[in-house]
Amino acid sequence: MNLRIIGIDPGTAITGWSILEIINDKIKTIAYGHITTFLQDDTAERLKELSNDLIKIIQKYKPVEAAIEDIFYFKNAKTIIKVSQARGAILLTLENLGISIAEYTPLQVKQAISGYGRAEKKQVQLMVKNILNLSKIPQPDDTADALAIAICHWQSRKMKLIEKLNN
């Protein structure tokens, strides 16, 4: 079975993205990067740019499932509002394109990648590098996070399949 997954770490300034392909239960990195928006643009322009860039990525790589980081807690209320707006634009874009969506908290992502839900960011990034057999840790952090989110989705799919077979 071949399956393409897009992993997304949402943000208004920087949104990390990754495309992974699952072939016979083996994971392969297809592409990854980040979308940046301009701070001087107003919020609506930034969200439009984010959506338009995401559409181009999806059209190019044709994923059928998406994994996006869910918001769980932020210290800064202004930050959570901006990230929530970016998530909304991303979710709407994915839904309009007919992409199946799964959402994961940072704790779930860390658990899936490192086996420990409170793992440090650097530890998760190193595990991403090792799991995907990359030559170096992807930068910026948002891109590495997007890869981790996609890996988490792959792991979650495997666990659900195992549960289904055991029932």
Image (cartoon, rainbow, N blue to C red):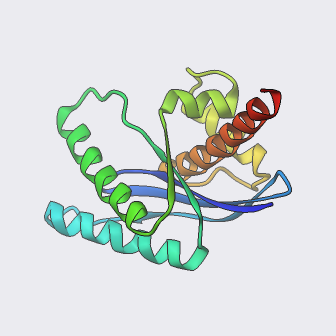
Seen in the image, is 105 located left or right of residue 62? Answer: left
Which quarter of the picture shows residue 2?
bottom right
Residue at image x 50%, y 62%? 99
Counting the numbered discs, the total is 0
Q: Is residue 38 visible?
A: no
Where does the image place residue 83, in percent across and percent down from the top left? 29, 46
Q: Nearest the camera: 33 or 28?
A: 28
Residue at image x 75%, y 34%? 164
Q: Nearest the camera: 70 or 101?
A: 101
Q: Quadrant of the N terminus?
A: bottom right
Q: Is residue 144 visible?
A: yes
Which quarter of the picture shows residue 4?
bottom right
Which residue occupies the extreme left position in the image? 42
Residue at image x 24%, y 65%? 46
Q: Quadrant of the C terminus?
A: top right
Where does the image place residue 79, in percent across and percent down from the top left? 24, 40
Q: Nearest the camera: 29 or 59?
A: 59
Residue at image x 75%, y 29%? 163
Q: Is residue 111 above or below residue 94?
A: above
Q: Is residue 27 above or below residue 54?
A: above
Where does the image place residue 75, in percent across and percent down from the top left? 26, 26
Which quarter of the picture shows residue 131?
top right
